[in-house]
Image: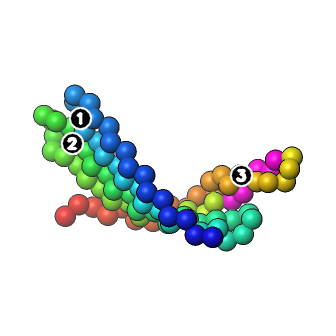
Amino acid sequence: MLFATNDTDVLKTDPALRVNNDLGLNVKMSEQFATRISYLSEFNDPRGRDREQTGRIIGLFLLINASQTASGAGEIRPACIFGPLARVLPQ
């Protein structure tokens, strides 16, 4: 199974504006394992203070089904995580 997710968060306050966007691709490999490849974009504008900051992170995660319920159905939890692979610095 293949799942695509996109999560955008905007936090606006008087002292700052912060925007995060997390684009991910999740692949179920078995009942016990799944992988996630993600691309996280960050923007932080500290209004009136230092200059704005941006960042991009590429992540690779291995998710392990670490819990079993009484019915035998499991909930995928990130029990073992490898990542981020790289932090891309602004030009």
Left or right: 53 as drawn, with respect to 75: left
Amino acid carrying mark 1 in the image: Ala
Residue at image coords 30%, 46%: 19
Q: Residues within 10 Å of mark 2 (few under 14, many from 20)?
A: some
Indicate whether 49 appears above or below 22.
above
Q: Which residue is mark 3?
A: 75
Q: Residue 26 got which mark?
A: none
Q: CA distance from mark 3 to mark 2?
A: 37 Å
Give the foreground label among 3 and 1.
3
Tell me the element at label 1.
Answer: loop
Tell me the element at label 3.
Answer: strand
Q: Which residue is mark 1?
A: 16
Q: Residue 45 got which mark?
A: 2
Q: Are marks 2 and 1 in contact (CB under 8 Å)?
A: yes
Left or right: 78 as drawn, with respect to 22: right
**Disc on the earlier residue, 3 or 1:** 1
The quarter of the rendered structure image containing the N terminus is bottom right
Q: Percent x, y for residue 34? A: 64, 65
Q: Nearer the viewer, residue 29 or 5?
A: 5
Q: Percent x, y for residue 11? A: 32, 37
Q: Percent x, y for residue 22? A: 41, 55
* Magenta-tinted stretch: 64-69
Q: CA distance from mark 3 to mark 1?
A: 37 Å
Q: Nearer the viewer, residue 35 or 5?
A: 5
Tell me the element at label 2.
Answer: strand
